[in-house]
């Protein structure tokens, strides 16, 4: 009797739940997104001064310096130039921006400019949902197609049906600040082992061996939180593979296989470094941030990381330098690089012209000069000079200039699919620990890419 | 617990009342009508009082829960039109090796997050139950401390403890056990037990405080009687302390089991489920699918399964603790 009643009571408690399920039972994601992503015909306005009083809302993830300081200065300079345009910024941490973007863009009053991340994880999905504006008209009007390097342009392009990346129309624009993977070196330790800054892959390997023999950790790296793995891995791929194949793999959706990119060789080379003891002891139990800190503290000869992301105290960077890992074939060094952010315009923005004018300004030489002023790597403007007195930053500016002039940047490999980063990190941890062969990493990445191509067709 | 007992008592009280009302109904139908309508009115009045709370509850819990259940039958990236998936997101539990592994880790964590703390808490409560240990309050305060700390802080602390140059390895080296040192959280064999021990540390205090409080309510006469009958400390524990703590045991088990089922923060903040997938839990998979690799339907299916399992587990614990009442 009691148990009967109890079941009835439980059923009673579950009824509203079921009812709620029915209420909510409409199909998700179908609220009018028959994405029309074509560029509207007709001319666009490019003179901000003639746009009347406008307030632009910008969402960004520049919460810390120097990102924030640069963005503040760019906004200030733009508002000074065009007093009729007011800009309101909203800065949120990266994770929050990525989680909130779809909802924000679907709302009636979305931010005009949003930092959708390149690749399939964010920008690609937003394009397919018709939530960001096709910028082709603006690209033509401002001449972006001519002034930006091809390799950077591709990173912001999708086909209007949202099925292909790296081709078609621009759905976002780069800013005049770079983010790229480079090799940092400790000047004092390099001198100690009697080596020079390596100009060939062989010289780099020799320096590793020498450091090891002298009891200096050749490479400081930390992989325990799955963050530090892709920086050395992608650098190796850029040094061992062909630039066009890497870009093609990321963009082509299955036509170029990952086995053609130099990725398999990179995995094996990374594993060999681990086996030879070139990676700092206990790298598997160290978090990436701790590894970066211990490199800054002088433990270790080389360190792979993003530009401008080492935790230097003022003046501390003098003891360090940077370069892009030289290629095995002696060709121009290739770096995994992109704009520090992609800026897209919301489809529902009421001030698309003013927003595009701001994007053009954020990619201008003036913005690049502001970047250099805050000692953060510029992009798109190879002529911008580094201020004297910071040798590491001079190296960075030289690298950025080289990448822009020679067009030797490749997109991040993990843009290929939404899950690629996760897949590579896990498989690589297995292989480094000797739990699986390097081939298993390649197979896992290949399987991931194939599955995603299939889901795109669905 | 208490509410369940009370409601059952009220049911028992209600049963004869209805029976007698039914009996009278044969003779005086007018009165029952009035009685029924007044009790009906009272029920509606109760609902009216409850309405504001129910409304909020429906908006923030029931409706999203229903949406979650609905979403779990679709493939959806959070933006474009969803496609019907049927039960595919649920069969993932059997076909997806990562998810299967995550479920296995949950069973492992149940030992460390629930059974160990309960056993340890019970032991320490039993040891301090009758004797007034000097400084017992201080011990309790120290052992309870983890409950006061934010999970994020706990994760950072343990990350430091297990670091290659952290305190644990220093202590091992100091005792001449340098050969055992390692980066604990980067080790395929040790990362999971290491996180498990951190969980034990976190839940131990709660269990101990619950049991210690419960033990103080056990009448001393029971212990005296047991001793008169010649019971040793062990016998005393099983015949007096343990039965006396049944209510607390149910609470402790429910809280810690639920904690073990949804372990997320400490894993996410230390290993992100690595190395490889050796510390991955269902909640970590859920988070990744919901936010970093948009596959909202699959994430919802995991959420639904976790909720159902949690419901079953708590019902089972309540049922067991009521025992032969």
Image: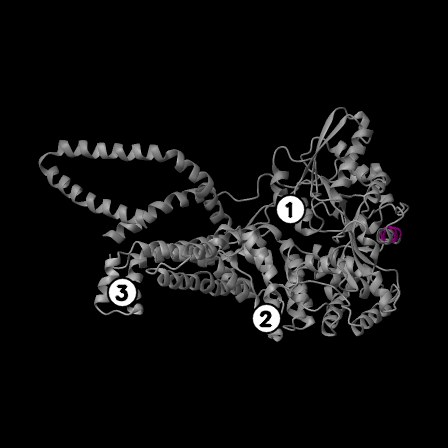
Question: Along the line of sight, which residue is nearer the eye, B263 or A411?
Answer: B263
Question: Do the residues marked 3 and 2 share a common chain?
Answer: yes
Q: Is residue A409 magenta?
A: no
Write down the chain letter for disc 3. B
Question: Quick one: SS at disc 3?
Answer: helix
Residue range corresponding to the magenta coloring? A397-405
CB atoms of marks 1 and 3 within 8 Å = no
Q: CA distance from mark 2 to mark 1?
A: 43 Å
From what the image shows, is residue B267 above or below residue A364? Answer: below
A139 relative to B134 in the view: left or right: right
Please tell me which of labels 3 and 2 falls first in the chain. Answer: 2
Q: Chain of mark 1?
A: A
Badge 2: residue crowd in 10 Å (few <14, some 14–19, many ≥20): some
Where disc 2 sits, the SS reads helix
User: Which chain letter goes with mark 2?
Assistant: B
Q: Is residue B141 above or below residue A345?
A: below
* Image coordinates for residue B103, horizontal then vertical, percent: 49, 63
**Relative to the observer, which residue lies in front, B314 or B69?**
B314
In the picture, measured across the screen, residue A415 lies left or right of residue B44, that is right
Front position among marks 1 and 3: 3
Look at the picture and state if A134 lies above or below A227: above
Q: Residues within 10 Å of mark 3 (few under 14, many from 20)?
A: some
- Which residue, given by chain and number where applicable, does mark 3 sit on? B239
Circle on res. A346: none
Mark 1 — residue?
Answer: A98
Report, in whole angstroms, how far the alpha carbon at label 1 lies from the one at label 3: 57 Å
Give the CA separation, mark 3 to mark 2. Answer: 41 Å
Between A21 and A230, which is closer to the camera in this rendering?
A: A230
> Visible in this render: residue B272?
no
Name the residue that disc number 2 marks: B172
* A400 magenta-colored: yes
């Amino acid at each position: 009797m009691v148990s009967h009643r109890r079941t009835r009571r439980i059923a009673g408690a579950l009824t509203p739940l079921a009812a709620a399920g029915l209420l909510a039972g409409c199909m998700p994601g179908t609220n009018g997104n028959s994405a029309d992503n074509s560029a509207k015909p007709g001319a666009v306005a490019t003179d901000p001064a003639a746009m009347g009083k406008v307030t632009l809302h910008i969402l960004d993830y520049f919460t810390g310096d120097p990102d924030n300081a640069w963005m503040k200065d760019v906004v200030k300079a733009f508002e000074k130039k065009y007093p009729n345009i007011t800009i309101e910024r909203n800065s949120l941490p990266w994770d929050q921006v990525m989680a909130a973007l779809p909802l924000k863009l679907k709302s009636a009053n979305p931010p005009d400019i949003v930092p959708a991340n390149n690749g399939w994880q964010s920008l690609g999905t937003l394009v397919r949902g018709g939530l960001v504006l096709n910028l082709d008209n603006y690209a033509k009007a401002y001449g972006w197609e001519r002034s930006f390097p091809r390799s950077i342009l591709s990173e912001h392009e999708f086909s209007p049906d949202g099925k292909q990346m790296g081709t078609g129309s621009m759905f976002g624009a780069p800013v005049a600040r770079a983010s790229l993977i480079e090799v940092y070196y400790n000047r004092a330790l390099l001198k100690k082992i009697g080596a020079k800054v390596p100009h060939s892959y062989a010289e780099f390997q020799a320096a590793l061996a020498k450091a090891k023999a002298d009891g200096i950790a050749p490479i400081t790296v930390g992989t325990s939180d799955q963050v530090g793995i892709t920086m050395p891995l992608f650098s190796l791929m850029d040094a061992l593979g062909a630039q066009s194949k890497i870009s093609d793999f990321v963009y082509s959706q299955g036509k170029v296989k990952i086995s053609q990119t130099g990725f398999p060789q990179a995995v094996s080379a990374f594993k060999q470094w681990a086996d030879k003891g070139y990676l700092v002891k206990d790298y598997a139990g160290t978090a990436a941030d701790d590894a970066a800190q211990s490199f800054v503290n002088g433990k270790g000869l080389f360190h792979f990381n993003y530009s401008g992301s080492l935790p230097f105290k003022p003046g501390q960077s003098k003891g360090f330098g940077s370069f892009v890992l030289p290629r095995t074939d002696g060709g121009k060094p290739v770096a995994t690089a992109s704009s520090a952010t992609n800026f897209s315009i919301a489809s529902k923005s009421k001030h698309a012209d003013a927003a595009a004018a701001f994007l053009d300004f954020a990619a201008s030489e003036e913005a690049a000069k502001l970047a250099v002023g805050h000692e953060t790597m510029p992009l798109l403007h190879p002529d911008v000079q580094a201020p004297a007195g910071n040798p590491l930053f001079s190296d960075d500016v030289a690298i950025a200039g080289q990448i822009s002039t020679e067009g030797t940047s490749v997109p991040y490999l993990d843009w290929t699919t939404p899950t690629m980063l996760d897949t590579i990190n896990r498989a690589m941890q297995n292989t480094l620990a000797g739990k699986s062969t390097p081939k298993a990493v390649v197979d896992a990445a290949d399987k991931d890419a194939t599955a995603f191509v299939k889901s795109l067709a669905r | 617990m208490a509410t369940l007992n009370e409601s059952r008592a009220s049911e028992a009280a209600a049963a004869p009342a209805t029976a007698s009302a039914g009996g009278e109904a044969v003779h005086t139908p007018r009165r029952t009508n009035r009685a029924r309508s007044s009790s009906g009115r009272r029920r509606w009045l109760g609902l009216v009082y409850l309405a504001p709370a129910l409304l909020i509850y429906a908006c923030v819990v029931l409706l999203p829960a229903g949406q979650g259940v609905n979403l779990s039958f679709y493939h959806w990236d959070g933006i474009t039109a969803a496609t019907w998936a049927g039960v595919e997101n649920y069969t993932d539990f059997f076909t997806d090796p990562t998810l299967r592994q995550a479920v296995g880790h949950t069973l492992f964590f149940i030992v460390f997050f629930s059974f160990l703390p309960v056993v340890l808490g019970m032991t320490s409560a039993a040891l301090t139950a009758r004797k007034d240990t000097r400084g017992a309050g201080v011990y309790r305060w120290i052992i309870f401390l983890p409950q006061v700390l934010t999970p994020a802080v706990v994760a950072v602390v343990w990350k430091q403890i297990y670091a290659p140059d952290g305190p644990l390895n220093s202590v091992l080296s100091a005792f001449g056990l340098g050969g055992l040192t390692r980066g604990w959280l980067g080790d395929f064999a040790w990362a999971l037990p290491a996180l498990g021990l951190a969980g034990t540390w976190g839940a131990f205090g709660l269990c101990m405080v619950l049991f210690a409080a419960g033990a103080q309510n056990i009448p001393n006469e029971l212990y005296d009687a047991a001793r008169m009958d010649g019971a040793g400390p062990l016998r005393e524990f099983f015949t007096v302390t343990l039965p006396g703590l049944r209510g607390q045991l149910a609470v402790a088990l429910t809280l810690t089991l639920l904690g073990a089922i949804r372990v997320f923060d400490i894993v996410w903040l230390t290993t992100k489920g690595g190395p490889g997938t050796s510390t991955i839990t269902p909640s970590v998979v859920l988070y990744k699918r919901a936010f970093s690799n948009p596959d909202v339907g699959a994430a919802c299916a995991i959420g639904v399964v976790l909720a159902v399992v949690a419901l079953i587990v708590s019902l089972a614990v309540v049922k067991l603790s009521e025992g032969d009442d």
